[in-house]
Amino acid sequence: MNSNDIQTELHAGDLPPGLSFGPSVAVDTETMGLNPHRDRLCLVQLSGGDGTCHLVQFAKGSYDAPNLKRLLGDPDITKLFHFARFDVAVIRRYLGIACRPVYCTKIASKMTRTYTDRHGLKDLCRDLLGVELSKEQQTSDWGAASLAPQQLRYAAGDVVHLHALRERLDALLAREGRAALAQACFDFLPARAELDLLGWDAPNIFEH
C-alpha cells in the first residue's frame, strides 16, 4: 500500500457515531511538541487496518469527543501504537482516558530485532513490509485551523500499516519465545505513561 492508496476522512472534534474498527484499532496522535504538559493534542488518527484512516482534529481546549473516548477506553478493543508510551500519556492528559489494552510495535521490534538499533516506524515499514514512508511533515504545525492534504497523508501513514506490522512482529515474538514478556510490557505501558505525566520520566525511578 502506497500513500496514494490511503483513504483519509477528517472529523472535527469527535468520531461519527456508529463507526466500528473491529477488535483492534491503530492509533496515533499529533501534538504541538513532545511535552504533554505544554504541547496540546491536535489530532488523533485511527485505522482498522483496511487502508482507511479517520482523523479527529481538535480545536484548542475542546476535548469532549464522547465517541472517541468510548472507543479508546473500550477494554475489548486493543489499541495499536508505535511508541505507545508517548501517545498513551497524551491521550490520558487531554482526553482523560487510560488506554487499555495496548500493543506497541516499537517495543515488539526492540524485543525481536536485536540485530539493529533502527526501530522507528519508517524503518519497520521498510524492513518488514517493503513500504517507504515519507517523514517530510513530521515537524508540521499541527495546531493550524486547516490541515494541508500532505499533512493528512503523513498522519494517516502513521497508523494504516500498524496492523500488518503487528502480524509480522507477533510471528517474531513467537519465534524468539518472547510473546509473554512482550505482553507484560504492553500491560505496564499505561502505568509507565502515568509515571511520565507525574514527573517520573527523568530521573527514571527504575534506575539505581
Image (spheres, rainbow, N blue to C red):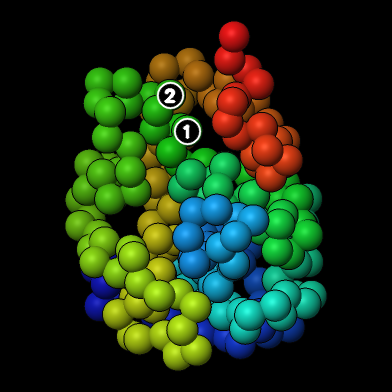
Return the residue nearer the eye: 33 or 152: 33
Q: Disc count in the image?
A: 2
Q: In the figure, 125 relative to 11: above or below?
A: above
Q: Horizontal and vertical percent for residue 194?
A: 72, 41
Q: Single out the residue that lies furthest toward the top.
A: 208
Find residue 190 and report its image quarter: top right
Give the residue type at disc 2: Met
Give the residue type at disc 1: Ile
Find residue 136 and report its image quarter: bottom left
Name which residue lies at 78% across and 66% down.
Answer: 70
Name which residue lies at 39% across and 46% down.
Answer: 165
Name which residue lies at 64% across and 49% down.
Answer: 89
* Residue highlighted by disc 1: 107
* Residue highlighted by disc 2: 111
Q: Residues within 10 Å of mark 1 (few under 14, many from 20)?
A: many
Q: Horizontal and vertical percent for residue 101?
A: 69, 44
Q: In the figure, 178 relative to 171: above or below?
A: above
Quadrant in the picture for the N terminus:
bottom left
Quadrant in the picture for the C terminus:
top right
Side (left or right) of 116 relative to 55 = left
Check whether the beta carbons of the residues at disc 2 and disc 1 lie within 8 A of each other: yes
Find residue 131 and report its image quarter: bottom left
Return the residue nearer the eye: 168 or 89: 89
Q: Horizontal and vertical percent for residue 182?
A: 55, 26
Q: Horizontal and vertical percent for residue 187?
A: 68, 33
The alpha-carbon separation of the residues under discs 2 and 1 comes to: 6 Å
Residue 136 seen anywhere in this rendered image of the structure:
yes
Name which residue lies at 62% across and 83% down.
Answer: 59
Query: Which secondary structure, mark 1?
Result: helix
Q: Residues within 10 Å of mark 2 (few under 14, many from 20)?
A: some
Query: Which secondary structure, mark 2?
Result: helix
Q: In the figure, 113 relative to 99: above or below?
A: above
